[in-house]
Amino acid sequence: MTELEGYRRQIDAIDAQLVELFLRRMEVTGAVGRYKQERGLPVLDAERERRVIAGKTEQIGDTARRADVAALYETIMGRSRRQQRQLVREAAAPGVTACAAAMACARQPVEHPRVAYQGEPGCYSEEAAAGLFGPEVDSMGLPWFEEVFLALRDGRADYAVLPIENSSTGSIRQVYDLLAQYEYYIVGEWQVKVEHCLTALPGVKLEELCTVYSHEQGLMQCEAFLDAHRDWKRVPALDTAGSAKQVAETGDRTAAAICSRRAARRYGLEILAEGINYNRENYTRFVLVSPVMELRAGRDTISALFRLPHQSGSLHEILTVFSVQGLNLEKLESRPIPGRGWEYLFFLEFSGDLAAPGMDGVLQELGQLSSQFRVLGNFRGYRP
């Protein structure tokens, strides 16, 4: 027997004991579940779990091993909670109740919808709307993101198409804040490859330019190109297509716009430079927002938001739920809460179907661990 084989035999012997002890522990936690069922007690006792884990780790001198033991017990406790939830029928957390009510009233996708987006015709948002509904979509551009949400509220639109993140510059913070403010639902998504162009009036040369207009995201995504022309003034606009429209309408031959080829064609501008964004794989992800929940075929992504108690380990407890349940956490985003210094609202996306067996238990646990919890939707992730 080699030295390695000897070590492996020792591990096998220890593992056999661990399996036996784990099964015995699950028998006892099953009994605890029946006890809670009889007395109407909740499955989750987060404070006791924290005390148990703290008690176990305090016995260990090695800091690294403390973290390992904490992670081991979090997983074991997560498995125990899942077992107990099969027995206990507890009252649903408020956010879970609201989700169930929305699912019960879910509508079918609207035929021939009216779609709102932020920006002027020719912008990337309009392109996303056409990608989702076809080139003949009945769409309207509005100046501000909140006006798009108000169009949904007032019944002037059936859907909104909104940019939520860019692969180069990250999340669109205004959209996340409005998703938290308005209780609407994400029912679909689309991606648009962003290829920015420097455009100007016909016949204008690079050396004539003094000012460049674009959305702040467009300016950031083209920083490397613009840094080679530091004498140009950079002016943020409401959207890329709006900057193209402004250059066309003012007739200013010292001005240029960073926009799409689509916008340049629409407003009669010439392209002076193409693909000027520094990231050649530059994509913007758009979400389709509805005032009513929809459960479309092929849905595989759940979006939710939550706020956590301001205490140590609360975010880690949430993340453990996904590990134990075998769910892929695809995105986690935080936004500061106005008036509450250094406290955050978290947005997450994870793989799943709201109607799948056991998903109500997952939502229940997320709701119990959060001081605020709301499901934002269930949709099919974009597949090119």
Image (tube, rainbow, N blue to C red):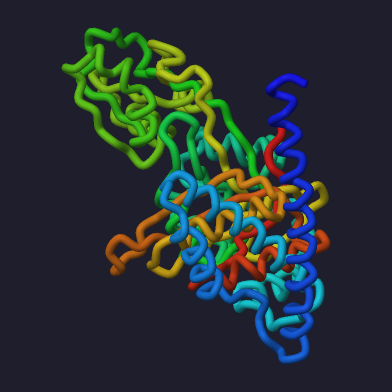
Q: Residue furthest bottom?
A: 39
Whole-percent x, y for residue 262 in the image = 53, 25
Q: Residue furthest front?
A: 1
| In this picture, residue 254 sits left or right of residue 127 | left
Q: Is residue 168 above or below residue 77?
A: above
Q: Residue furthest left?
A: 231
Q: Is residue 194 above or below residue 53?
A: above
What residue appears at the point 68 percent right and 22 percent down from the top-left corner? 3
What residue appears at the point 55 percent right and 59 percent down from the top-left corner? 318
Q: Is residue 204 above or below residue 320?
A: above
Q: Quadrant of the N terminus?
A: top right
Query: Which residue is at the front of the view, 159 or 26?
Result: 26
Q: Is residue 219 visible?
A: yes
Q: Is residue 384 visible?
A: no
Determine which quarter of the picture holds residue 97. bottom right
Q: Quadrant of the C terminus?
A: top right
What residue appears at the point 53 percent right and 21 percent down from the top-left corner? 281
Query: Which residue is at the front of the view, 172 or 258?
Result: 172
| In this picture, residue 251 sits left or right of residue 367 | left
Whole-percent x, y for residue 271 in the image = 42, 14
Determine which quarter of the picture holds residue 134. top right
How many labels were placed on the picture? Answer: 0
Whole-percent x, y for residue 293 in the image = 69, 63
Query: Which residue is at the front of the view, 206 or 47?
Result: 47
What residue appears at the point 51 percent right and 74 percent down from the top-left corner? 47
Whole-percent x, y for residue 365 in the image = 64, 68
